[in-house]
Structures are given as structure tokens and as C-alpha cells.
Amino acid sequence: MVVPVSIAENPGLVTFQTVITYDPTVLTPISVDNGPVWSGDIVYNLNYDIDQVFAAGSSASMRTGDGAIFNIEFAVDPKAADGAYPITVEVMELKTLNAQYTQLDIPRIVENGVVTFKRVIRGNVTGSGVVSASDATEVLLYIARLKELAEWQLLAADMRKPIPDGLGISAADATEILLVVARLKDPPITPGAGYAPLSPAEPGIMGAAVPGISAARGSVAMGVPSVELSLGAASGSPGDVVTVPVRISGNTGFSTFTFYLEYDNAKLELLDDIASGPAWPGEIVYNPAAQSDSGDRFAILTGASGRNRSSDGEIAYVSFRVLDGAEAGDACISLSVQELKAIDPSYEQVDVPFLSRSFDALTMVTPPVDTVVAPPAEAVVKTVIVGGVELEIREASGIAMLSPTKEQMGAILKAAGNDIVIDLREYAGIDFRAAAEWFKDVDKTITFVTSKGSDTVKTKTLWNNSGKDRVIEVRNGKASVKND
């Protein structure tokens, strides 16, 4: 660790002579180096006494400016007990020059420093003494800006560097912790760094040399990008809740992700409601109320796992409410990829190449229901068999509309397997209406097949406590969910 001996309100320094006293049971001096204030030679003795370092310098010209005169580097005894240890400075001489080149003493107030140590176990962010999955959760909460971590916690969370500095912590560090917990990797060991220096109180000085204590701070690409991330489209009227899926295709496997989500807050309200999709069955840490440096609101989605997830499909479902009074038209939603990593066969984390770092989707805001022009007259076209149940199809403008009864939907959910298929490939789109309450505690999927493509929706995303019907709209082969 480095201890700077500094000066403030410097009138112009030409001579200094100091003795720094430290606790030899904790610290061993290694070197003395120039600080920005003093560019000349420094004479020093690391063994001035058993617990003292001597440092002095002289110059024929004044050295101006505030900051460190010199820095002392100490080694920390890894067996030292946690606690606070004083470092004091004795100023034997501190001089400046007047206009006649006469040396004058600089009046000074000397304030001593203190360094505090806490034992840090790599990966043990909570300080419990044992590395566990809860430490990974602490990292994810920090990445999502839902809580702050102390300096020693950041050092403990820094799992991917030989010498931790607490900088650049990401969800990949949470994955490293999970790999250690699962005993797939050994915890990282930092030679000679069993302790982390905590931030000391900054001493105040006026025309004086004072020590300040500071913490010691000093991928491999996988093939051609084939992974594509996308946002699903949706539409709704003012007051509607719409669900936008975050999708992945060409998935080569990923274990860690962090996404930022921006949206048109003049038309949309981001809800504190997120669900994991089939492509990410694990937990997602979600902050819908993050703020940028400029004050703009955005969302953070992050997750980490001890193994790769390799399925295509929805990673997450994010819900918005269309604001009352929102003007009809497009509302842009943008998602940027901050991090996407996978675990290789050696249990090292590597970046996953993907086609685009940021991408947009449009949510169509439609006029309120009472201003919508009535659609053309509907006519019964045919029926379709779903899970052994015959459903009536009504058609309008090339869209197949299905509205099963409670009894019909109950029979379909009971009779069908885990994936319910509604094959209407002769139609360009589908509107499927059903009561939200019918899907409570139901864990299945419904696949809609149209002439424009197919898409799958989880029944878990259809249930809510709004008391309204749910509508699945399938357009251009993509499904979106909203309240009727």
C-alpha cells in the first residue's frame, strides 16, 4: 500500500526534513518515491529507527502546488489483526524563500493519518466468512444499482484479476463466485494481499506535510458472431399493459448478461414487473428506476449462472403501461448489451460475439377504444382442433380470432401436453382472447403458427390480477401480450 505525505496551501517549498512513524507489527517500508510536488532528489532511510522512515530534500528553487511531496510504499503483514493503525509525521524542517532568497520557516499545522485494515476473502462480498451464492446476489444488486458496496466489498467481488482493485465489477464476477461455490473452480488467491485497506478519513492541513492513506490500487472471442438479440413488438391503447419480450436466437450458450433498456417515457411507463423466459430460467435482477448521469430513467436487467443457457427464445418479459393521453403512433424502446459471456470448457468466462450491441423496437400506441373505427363485419370461417377441443374461428381482414370459453380452455389445458399448438398457417395473424385468471399456476407454453411464422408464449405471462382478459396478438410471426 502507498502512503502519500502531502502539503496544502503551499507557499513555495525549498527544504523539508521529516520522520514518519508507523506500526512495525503491521507495516514494513519498501520504498520512497517522489510525489507531484517534489521533482528533485529525496534522501531517505527506511531504517531510521525500528518504526521510523526518514525523508528529506532541498532545492535552490521553490516547488509550488499542493499534493504529495513523496510517497512511502509499505508491505502489509498478512497475519496482522483487523483494526486501525496510526501513522504520524514529525516535521523537523519545512522552509520557503523570501524575495531576498532568505530561507524562512513555513508555519504549519500537522495532522496525522490512520490506516484501517479488514481481512478480505475473495468472493465473500457479504463478509460472512464463507463464499456462498448470496455473495453473487450482492454483486448483481450492485451491478443493477440497487445497492452500494463498500471498498472492501468491491475488492472481495473482484474475482477475475490476479491483483484485485475493485474496478470494473460486472455480472461476470457473480458467475465466478457461483463457479467457486459449486467447486468447479478454486477461489483466486492474491499473493500477499490478505487484507484490504479501507478508505481513511482525509486529514485537513494548512501549509503542512501530512500523510494521507489510500487503498492500494495499483476475451477470448468464440467464432463468427451468430447470436442475435431482439426486442418483440407490441401495441396497446392508453391504459393498456403491454409485454415486450427480450429474445435471443442463434444461441451458442451464455451464462452472464447485463442489458440496459431505454424507452419513450412520454408514452410508456415501465412497470416493476419482469418474468424470466424459457431461454433464461434463472433469476433476473431488475432495476426499473435506474438514472443516468443526465437524469434520464432507464432499466437494468442482469443475471448470472454457473452454467451456460443454450436455448433460443425469450430471455425476459418486460411490462409497460401505455400512459393516459399518449398520442397515437410509435413509442421507441431501445436495449443495449453491456455484457454477454459464456463459460468455456476450462470454466473460464469468455465474451459471446453477437450481431448488434444495441437495437430498437417500436410499440404502437393505438387510439382509445371508443375512437377505434369498427372493423369489417366478421364471419364464421371454420373451426380448429386444439388439444382435442374444437374452437370456432372468426375472421376479419385476414386475422383469425379465437375466444374459447372457460370450459374449452380448461379442457385444452388439461388434455394437452406442455406445449399447446394452435396451427392456423393459412392466416397472416391471430388474435387469441382469454381470461387472465384461467392461467393462474399453469406452467405451459402456447405456440401460434401463422403464414408469417410462429412464436411461443408462456402461460405464466398471461396471468395477472387485473381482472381483465388477456389478448395475444400474432403479427408478422411475432406474438405480443396485452390486456383486453
Image (tube, rainbow, N blue to C red):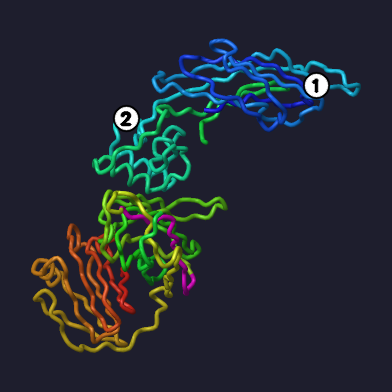
On the image, the x and y values in percent for residue 265 come to: 49, 61
Tell me which corner region of the image, top left, top right, bottom left or bottom right, holds residue 480. Answer: bottom left
The extreme right residue here reads: 100
Q: Nearer the viewer, residue 451 or 206?
A: 206
| Residue 36 screen position, x and y as percent | 68, 33
Q: Residue furthest top?
A: 49
Q: Quadrant of residue 421?
A: bottom left
Query: How packed is label 2: few (under 14 Cα within 10 Å), some, or many (20 or more)?
Result: few
Q: Nearer the viewer, residue 417 or 224?
A: 224
Is residue 243 placed above or below 70 in the rendered structure? Answer: below
Seen in the picture, residue 386 relative to 184 is either above or below; the reply is below
Amino acid type, mark 1 = Thr
Q: Earlier in the sequence, mark 2 or mark 1?
A: 1
Name above or below for residue 158 compared with residue 84.
below
Relative depth, front residue between 463 and 60: 60
Residue at (38, 74) in percent of width and height? 369
Q: Is residue 382 above or below residue 200?
A: below
Q: Secondary structure at mark 1?
A: strand
* Identity, as a three-letter code, of the amino acid under mark 2: Ser
Q: Which region shows up in magenta? A: 327-343
Q: Is residue 210 left or right of residue 461?
A: right
> Badge 1 local density, few (<14 within 10 Å), some, or many (20+)?
many
Q: Residue at x 11, y 74 (%)?
A: 387
- For disc 1, the marked residue is 96
Give the image quarter of residue 449: bottom left
Please give the residue where the numbered disc 2 appears in the rendered image.
Answer: 128
Viewer-nearest residue: 200 or 250: 250
Does residue 208 appear left or right of residue 258 in this picture? right
